[in-house]
Image (spheres, rainbow, N blue to C red):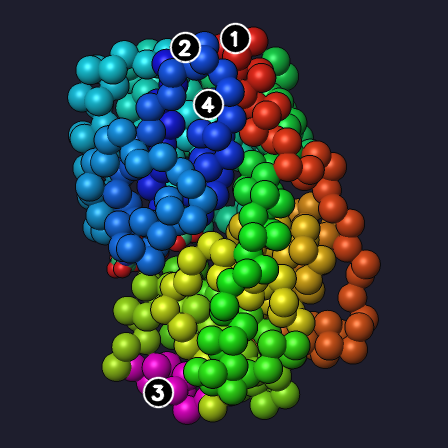
Amino acid sequence: MKIINIVGARPNFMKIAPLMAEYSKHPEIDPILVHTGQHYDEKMSDLFFRQLGIPEPDINLGIGSASHAVQTAEIMKAFEPICLEHKPDAVLVVGDVNSTIACGLVAVKLGIKLIHVEAGLRSGDRAMPEEINRVLTDSISDLLFCTEQSGVDNLLAEGVSKDKIHMVGHVMIDTLLKNLEKSQQSNILSEIQSQFGVNGDSFAVLTMHRPSNVDDPVVFSRILDALEVIQNDMPIIFPMHPRTRKNITGTNLGNRIDGMTNLHLLDPIGYLDFLKLTSSAKLVLTDSGGIQEETTVLKIPCITLRENTERPITAEMGSNQVVGTDTQKILHAYQNATSGNWRDPQVPPLWDGKASERIVKILSDNQL
Ligand code: UD1
């Protein structure tokens, strides 16, 4: 069975890594790895391949950054000839980035079966580019693998037939559990100590890159109002996404960030450094999707700077609180987290490091 597997952007790499490793135990599966090149930097892409032991992509489409329409269209144009040449039995996509829907659409238009890993998640917010990608990809997929029960429920409510849906756990958590011990050898804590004088036993980690936060100066400043107060109490380490960096350079927002003496910026960091950083932090502030899930497994309080989450299990049983972007609400959550007033988090069902094993078994049993 020939399966083309798609990666494009940073959050895809930790999801594809355990699947590629699992395929190698199944000689009946012939996997091809295609990188669309949506993310192309050493720090946003290559480093992850090396650290996670992902094989070199068989094909790199080299698309890079562009508007959503151009990026999606260019990926489709470049991917179609690959499908025609290799004639795969299936195309497997992960997550919710533009590469996911672009390659999914090419596959189904050619009559190739489509497999979606991390299906069914819904924020209910159609202004979020990823929500559109999720809804569309799920609606054209033949086999849908879910990380949490809400995903299964959403798909059933949207009329997806039950026999296409499998609750398997989370491939991204497979990668976390596999690398947690290794990540403890990272030097990131001594680096933040020597670079910023930040003590490794009391700091917060911040990540922010969602367009709704960083493309809107009013929302961004509301968050900065809260960060200004928090950094007076606890140092904040902020590995900055290129989108965020681009948006603040030479602006008032950039000046405000530069003026905060205890908010420390880093370039994007690799997987192992980030895992060491988050697993050592007192708390995490983020607008990422995946980090809500990683902090749930690490049992680190997570303050989500968004009005909604497509991963409700992290807030229902994990360490996540979805607080939005109101300054006072962020500060209130911070106070709760630092005073120990936080739910004792539980790890969601099947987030046990075996999701990729379950998925590949189902593929191998040929349920396509
Ligand atoms: C994309 C995903 C988002 C994911 C995020 C993780 C979509 C719609 N969004 O958003 O879901 O959470 O990746 O990072 O697919 N850039 C670089 N180097 C790179 C890649 C990007 O400098 O290797 C810069 C470019 O200037 C680009 C900007 O970052 O314009 C945004 O990149 P893009 O891929 O368009 O979207 P992300 O915001 O990264």
Decide: marks 2, 3 in contact (CB < 8 A)? no
Residue at the (42%, 77%) spot, across then down: 265
C-alpha distance separating marks 2 and 4? 13 Å
Q: What amino acid type is highlighted by mark number 3?
A: Asn
Which sits earlier in the primary sequence, circle 2 or circle 4?
Answer: 2
C-alpha distance separating marks 2 and 3? 55 Å
Identify the element where label 3 is drawn: helix
Decide: marks 2, 1 in contact (CB < 8 A)? yes
Give the class, few, some or many, for how many residues have Cα within 10 Å of label 1's Cα (few <14, many ≥20): few
* Magenta stretch: dominant secondary structure: helix
Q: Is label 3 or label 4 in front?
A: 4
* Range shown magenta: 251-260
Which sits earlier in the primary sequence, circle 2 or circle 3?
Answer: 2
| Viewport quadrant of the N terminus | top left
Identify the element where label 4 is drawn: loop
Asked if the magenta segment contains residue 15, the reply would be no
Front-most of residues 67 and 80: 80
Which sits earlier in the primary sequence, circle 4 or circle 1?
Answer: 4
Q: What amino acid type is highlighted by mark number 4?
A: Ser
Q: Residue 24 carries which label?
A: 4
Q: Residue 255 carries which label?
A: 3
Determine the image quadrant of residue 367. Answer: top right
Give the class, few, some or many, for how many residues have Cα within 10 Å of label 4's Cα (few <14, many ≥20): few
Which sits earlier in the primary sequence, circle 2 or circle 1?
Answer: 2
Decide: marks 3, 4 in contact (CB < 8 A)? no
Front-most of residues 236 and 247: 236
C-alpha distance separating marks 4 and 1? 17 Å
Q: Residue 1 carries which label?
A: 2
| Residue 106, image x, y percentages | 29, 24
Dividing the image into four quarters, tell me where ligand 1 lies. Answer: bottom left
Side of 57 where 330 appears, left or right: right
